[in-house]
Image (cartoon, rainbow, N blue to C red):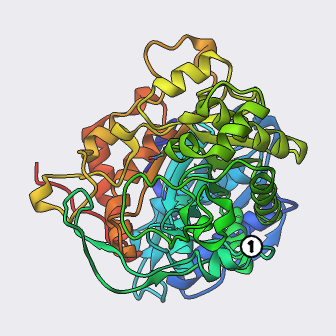
């Protein structure tokens, strides 16, 4: 009952029983993965299986082996062979072994995820032969920690369920108008001031007059917290992509350092409502220096090759009205405010490229021209992604209509308040990240796709859980499994088992509609 479904799976007869006497065998780089299997089984089994050195299949053992001859499976592929007398997990790289372990755990009774010994359980894995590898290399989910701060322990819990579903990328939206969530040593006011707002709008922000809850909201991750999150994710083969928004969605930073804004004489506070905020960084050398200082600390924390700089919804009214910005546009020989934004983003692209990283941004970064190595995250539908791929840019698909998990997943009158939209489970499952009109050479640029958990209307982690699953389970199959293996009815049967796992993991997923 695997989610996502593997590329190839042949069922055998009988099963392998894991007992306290089962030995886990591995050597070299496979040992770290083998330990994760031992750790994963220990609480529910009530014992730690013995680890032994080696790589050859043997009776009574679960063997994990790096096998470079399986290169054709790619860096994340694996084979899992379960016979009555032994289990063999092989793959060309450690990530593949890790995914083999996730499949093995999913084939055991869901109780294997309990955190204390399960009395009377029998840990039988049905005999099977699996060959598996992902369809896409970017299998992502984005968590907005700005609109509502998400405690570190929740981020770790989220990483666990993402790994179980073979996701490999977690984007943390760390800065926005309503809160700055990452400690920056050089600019302490970013978190002293920018991480806290006085109150929050109640109900839907589209409905005026606004009412407020009168309670402060805030929080931030220390650099040690972020190192912990990044390390925990890396252990689970998940890359954490930091997102630092610019030039718009910058009000919390401007509240901390008013000179970064277009009206330094009119101090601001972090925003207390939702929507597109007019406050934008002033594109002076000082601001560029500030943002690059911030990125320098970000790069030291996040080994991610790709760094997200936002770039979306930067409204230009303040730039239009500012004599300083107008003079800047002239001085740089630019045509207009769009070119000003493009110039801003290019400064970041050059900066990141010099440090050996790549820039990714929302699809607005295409406007006014984009540096060649930059990656585009297509959110305003797929048009941006299609245009970017035509220009030779790599693309991550994140279109609102299929990947915005802040949208309703059922009739609004029966659901908790959400931002709007309509994105039921089936629609997520039916998503195809490669647009039909794309030529094969363009399609090569589609790295994968990402689900978005914007958190304006997700005030609690329970609500984040509710919006994330089961839709993320559906997306895992879109991103991992071959398109021709997809079958919604069959998925629902496997999903029922997946939900039992989520029940045990105390995940507040949305219940399925009665068909
Ligand atoms: C976005 O939803 N503004 C990327």
In the image: residue 236, left or right of residue 287: left
Q: In the drawing, does residue 111 fall left or right of residue 28?
A: left
Neighbor class of circle 1 (other Cα within 10 Å; few <14, some 14-19, many 20+) is: many
Q: Which residue is disc 1 drawn over?
A: 184
As drawn, is 238 to the left or to the right of 356? Answer: left
- Is residue 515 visible to the viewer in this orientation of the structure? yes
Identify the element where label 1 is drawn. Answer: loop
Give the residue drawn at x 54%, y 34%.
363
Q: Position of residue 298 (x, y in %)?
A: 76, 62
Q: Position of residue 165 (x, y in %)?
A: 49, 55
Q: Nearer the viewer, residue 100 or 308?
A: 308
Q: Quadrant of residue 211?
A: bottom left
Where residue 239 appears, x then y in whole percent?
68, 55
- Residue 61 in sight: no
Tell which of 147 and 485 is nearer to you: 147
Whether the residue carrying mark 1 lies under 8 Å from ligand 1 is answered with no
Task: Answer above or below: position of 213 versus 422.
Answer: below
**The quadrant where residue 429 appears:** top left
Of residues 236 and 176, the one nearer the viewer is 176
Q: Is residue 372 above or below residue 70?
A: above
Where residue 311 sits in the image (x, y, percent)?
59, 44
- Most foreground residue, 165 or 374: 374
The structure residue drawn at horizontal position 52% and vertical position 56%, both measured from the top left corner, is: 279
Q: Would residue 317 appear left or right of 466 to someone viewing this image?
A: right
Residue at 36% in and 52% down: 405
Quadrant position of residue 72:
top right
- Total labels: the figure holds 1
Compared with residue 129, is residue 239 higher up or lower down, i.e. above or below? below
């Amino acid at each position: 009952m695997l989610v996502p479904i593997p590329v190839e799976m042949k069922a055998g007869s009988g099963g392998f029983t894991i007992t306290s006497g089962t030995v886990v065998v591995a050597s070299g780089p496979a040992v770290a993965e083998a330990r994760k299997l031992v750790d994963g089984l220990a609480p529910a089994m009530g014992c730690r299986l013995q680890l032994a050195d080696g790589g050859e299949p043997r009776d009574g053992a679960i063997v994990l082996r790096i096998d470079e001859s399986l290169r054709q499976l790619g860096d994340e592929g694996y084979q899992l062979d379960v016979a009555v007398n032994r289990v063999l997990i092989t793959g060309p790289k450690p990530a593949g072994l890790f995914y083999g372990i996730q499949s093995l755990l999913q084939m055991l009774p869901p109780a294997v995820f309990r955190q204390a010994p399960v009395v009377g359980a029998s840990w039988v894995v049905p005999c099977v032969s699996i060959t598996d590898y992902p369809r896409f290399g970017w299998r992502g989910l984005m968590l907005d920690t700005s609109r509502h701060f998400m405690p570190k322990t929740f981020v770790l819990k989220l990483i666990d369920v993402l790994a179980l579903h073979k996701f490999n990328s977690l984007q943390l939206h760390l800065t926005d108008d309503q809160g700055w969530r990452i400690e920056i040593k050089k600019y302490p006011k970013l978190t002293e001031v920018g991480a806290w707002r006085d109150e929050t709008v109640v109900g839907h922000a589209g409905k005026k007059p606004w009412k407020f809850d009168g309670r402060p909201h805030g929080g931030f991750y220390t650099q040690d917290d972020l190192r912990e999150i990044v390390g925990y994710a890396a252990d689970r083969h998940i890359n954490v992509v930091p997102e630092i928004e610019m030039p718009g969605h910058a009000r919390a930073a401007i509240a901390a350092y008013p000179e970064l804004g277009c009206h330094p004489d009119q101090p601001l506070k972090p925003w207390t409502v939702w929507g597109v905020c007019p406050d934008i960084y002033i594109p002076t050398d000082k601001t560029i220096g500030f943002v690059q200082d911030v990125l320098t600390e970000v790069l030291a924390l996040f080994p991610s090759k790709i760094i997200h700089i936002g770039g979306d919804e930067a409204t230009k009214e303040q730039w239009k009205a500012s004599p300083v910005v107008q003079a800047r546009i002239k001085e740089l020989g630019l045509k207009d405010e769009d070119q000003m934004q493009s110039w801003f983003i290019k400064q970041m692209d050059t900066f990141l490229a010099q440090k050996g990283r790549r820039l990714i941004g929302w699809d607005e970064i295409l406007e006014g021209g984009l540096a060649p190595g930059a990656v585009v995250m297509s959110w305003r539908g797929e048009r941006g992604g299609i245009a970017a791929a035509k220009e030779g840019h790599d693309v991550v698909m994140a279109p609102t209509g299929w990947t915005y998990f802040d949208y309703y997943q059922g009739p609004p009158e029966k659901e908790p308040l959400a931002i709007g939209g309509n994105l039921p489970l089936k629609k997520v499952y039916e998503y195809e990240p490669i647009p039909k009109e794309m030529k094969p050479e363009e399609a090569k640029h589609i790295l994968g796709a990402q689900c978005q958990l914007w958190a304006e209307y997700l005030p609690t982690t329970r609500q984040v859980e509710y919006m994330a699953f089961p839709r993320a389970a559906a997306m895992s199959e879109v991103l991992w499994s071959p398109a021709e293996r997809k079958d919604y009815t069959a998925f629902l049967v496997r999903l029922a088992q997946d939900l039992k796992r989520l029940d045990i993991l105390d995940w507040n997923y949305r219940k399925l509609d009665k068909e």
